[in-house]
Amino acid sequence: MKKIINRKVYNTETAELLGKYWNSLGNDDFNYLHEELYITKKGNMFL
């Protein structure tokens, strides 16, 4: 998946996944949270 953040394109397929968090709630719950932290080859990190 490609994301544009501050006019820069980040690609989750070429970046390395450092970690992820899920609060164990279903995606139909208002408090559902799922995040993934990636790092690019240049050292930039993004969620």
Image (cartoon, rainbow, N blue to C red):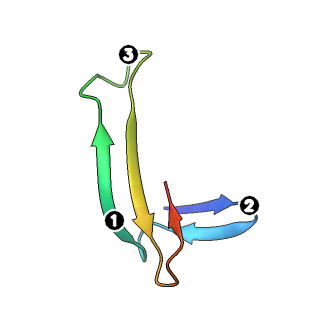
For the point 76% across and 65% down, which residue is it?
7
Per the image, label 3 sits on a secondary structure element best described as loop
Q: How far apart, in angstroms, are the residues tagged by discs 1 and 2?
A: 20 Å
Asked whether 46 or 25 is in front, the reply is: 46
Q: Specify the amino acid type for callout 3.
A: Asp
Q: Locate residue 5 relative to residue 38 in the image: left or right.
A: right
Residue at figure coordinates x 74%, y 60% from the top left: 6
Determine the secondary structure under disc 1.
strand
Q: Residues within 10 Å of mark 3 (few under 14, many from 20)?
A: few
* Dot 2 amino acid type: Asn
- Give the total of numbered labels: 3
* Residue 15 spot, x, y in % from top left: 42, 74
Q: Cβ–Cβ below 8 Å for labels 1 and 2? A: no
Q: Secondary structure at mark 2?
A: loop
* CB under 8 Å between discs 3 and 2: no
- In front: mark 3 or mark 2? 2
Looking at the picture, does residue 2 appear above or below residue 41?
Answer: above
Select label 3 or label 1 by which is in front. Answer: 1
Question: Can you tell which quarter of the image residue 5 is in?
Answer: bottom right
Q: Residue under circle 3? A: 29
Q: Is residue 5 rendered to the left or right of residue 43? A: right
Residue pushed farthest right? 7
Mark closer to the chain start, 3 or 1: 1
Q: Residues within 10 Å of mark 2 (few under 14, many from 20)?
A: few
Q: Which residue is mark 2?
A: 6
Image point (38%, 18%), residue name:
28
**Disc sitting over residue 17 in the figure:** 1
Question: As displayed, is residue 15 above or below residue 18?
Answer: below
User: Is residue 5 found left or right of 26 in the rendered image?
Assistant: right
Q: Determine which of the numbered discs, if any, sits on residue 31 in the image.
A: none
